[in-house]
Image (cartoon, helix red, strand yellow):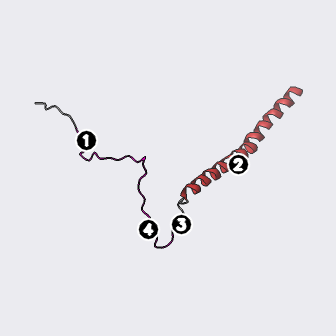
Amino acid sequence: MRFLFILLLIYFGYQIFFRFVLPLAARYLFQKAAQNMQGQFNSRQQPKAPPRREGEVRIETPGTNARKNNDDDGEFVDYIEVR
């Protein structure tokens, strides 16, 4: 009789856990992940440059680490003529 009672208690415990507790925990974790992603998205959308005054002209040039590409001839293809 005691074994049957423990078995039923374990069965109903699993039912309650998987029906009520697990969905609440999953919903909480998904909401936290969504808030984290939303925060990351919003931080990337805001411009990093300071605002400029009206009429100010600014010329931006590439830095010294910028790679210059002087090869405007295109790509050379070596081919063999087949008859």
Q: Which residue is mark 1?
A: 75
Q: Amino acid at mark 4?
A: Val
Q: Which residue is mark 4?
A: 57
**Distance in Å between CA atoms under marks 2 and 4:** 49 Å
Residue 56 appears anywhere in the view: yes
**Secondary element at tag 4:** loop
Q: Amino acid at mark 2?
A: Tyr
Q: Residue at x 46, y 73 (%)?
A: 55
Give the magenta-colored segment's residue range.
52-76
**Secondary element at tag 3:** loop
Q: Is residue 4 left or right of residue 73?
A: right
Residue 1 appears anywhere in the view: no
Q: Which residue is mark 3?
A: 51
Q: Is residue 66 magenta?
A: yes
2 or 4: mark nearer the eye = 4
**Residue 65: where, in percent of width, then height?**
43, 46
Q: Which mark is residue 54?
A: none
Q: Residue at x 46, y 70 (%)?
A: 56
Mark closest to the chain's N terminus, 2 or 3: 2
Q: Is residue 35 magenta?
A: no
Q: Nearer the viewer, residue 54 or 35?
A: 54
Q: Amino acid at mark 1?
A: Glu
